[in-house]
Amino acid sequence: MATILLITVFVLGYLAIAFEHPLKLNKAAPALITGVVCWTIYLLQGDNPHHAVEELMHHLGEIASILFFLLGAMTIVELIDSHNGFEIITQKITSTKKSTLLLLVAGITFFLSALLDNLTTAIVMTSLCAKLLTDKEDKLWFAGMIVIAANAGGAWSPLGDVTTTMLWIGGQITALSIIKQLILPSLVVGILPAAIIARKFAGKTLALHPIANSTEKEKREGTIILSAGIGFLLFVPAFKTVTHLPPFMGMMLALGCMWIITTLLHKEKEPELAEKYNVARALQKIDSSSILFFLGILLAVAALQSIGLLTQLAQFLSNTLQNDYLIGITLGILSALVDNVPLVAASQGMYDLATYPTDHPFWEFLALTTGTGGSMIIIGSAAGVAVMGIEKIDFMWYLKKISWLALVGFAGGVGVFMLQHLF
């Protein structure tokens, strides 16, 4: 009974998020209500409230690490933006063809997300496109492509996506093998939608970005902040690899260092002027409703995981489908609806290394499908949630315009992976 009630609340919450525009309600409100109500049902259905609270606090640790990571990344990007750092990059882009620009953005996003991670890359590239494009519709199409390319790029790198990192740390995959096996399928996941969207923009041009009237001193400050910001974002995965601390620790260290740099850079200025460029102002400007929305969604999914629903689902799929590829594809499609992290965690718990040893195609296929499947629905991945917040993308717009493209890319990637193992 409690499970049915929990699923009902989750579905109703999902629908409220999907129809936020007709309801004229910020998506953070139904997400937060859904998260809290799901946990209330879970707590009341059991006979040990203390255990339920312990479980909540355990999940909250994981959720908070993602939220603080998101907060840090968004603040650093906002700092670069307030110092006109992105102007330095946009002035280097001289192409006026929208189709060429789209392919360039998709390519940079794909490879950068393997280096950084898909969440940070999506935030950086969406902020960059907001500077390059003036038309709202163009921004939405580019943002949709960024979500697909960031998730595709994250799947083939052990640092690019949370699920791939989980499998790497868990010993299910090795770094070299995952790169070798998934680089080609992941490329196809990104190339197919990019080619289709580029055709939509064929022959269309955009006005050259106007050059900001900055003094030499302001340009120098912008260059320093851009270099430091990108440098620190690249430092985060390296810090995680060396220390084995969660990524948010590296991001908080990076933010602290950026705070010192901006303070030193503007210490000679008038307090009112210096305040315009400091971290406190950047924190005020980031979209905090997106972070609360993310909190609500992750809390709701954690409740489904705690009641055992996701593990039951994984076992049901295993018993029903009895085929590695079908299980992987279904989990990939499901990762568009619920977070891919608990799905992969459930799979790691179900299938041991005796059944599927390290670098078995099952684990590599799971990394591909759950990493890229989230692109099919905008709230199916962390990158999608972040981009949705930055560009104010409507859930239904994405579902109509981008979801089928993500599905085409997903199917292409799955096909290439199967062919690789056939020959």
Image: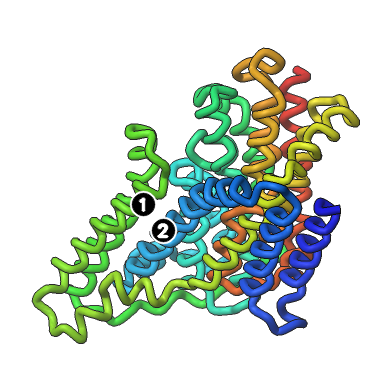
User: Do tag 1 and tag 2 residues touch (Cβ < 8 Å)?
Assistant: yes
Is residue 414 in sight in this rendering? yes
- Looking at the image, what colour scheme do you see? rainbow
Left or right: where 232 falls relative to 74: left
Q: Earlier in the sequence, mark 1 or mark 2?
A: 2
Q: Position of residue 150 (x, y in %)?
A: 57, 50
The single residue placed furthest to the left in the displayed view is 268
The extreme top residue here reads 354
Identify the amino acid type marked 1: Met
Quadrant in which residue 144 is drawn = bottom right
Asked which quadrant contains residue 24, the reply is bottom right
Quickly name the residue at label 2.
73
Residue bearing mark 1: 251
User: Crowdedness of circle 1 by 10 Å Cα count: few (<14), some, many (20+)?
Assistant: many
Element assignment for label 1? helix
Let me know if residue 203 appears in the view: no
Q: Amino acid at mark 2?
A: Ala
Q: Position of residue 152 (x, y in %)?
A: 61, 44
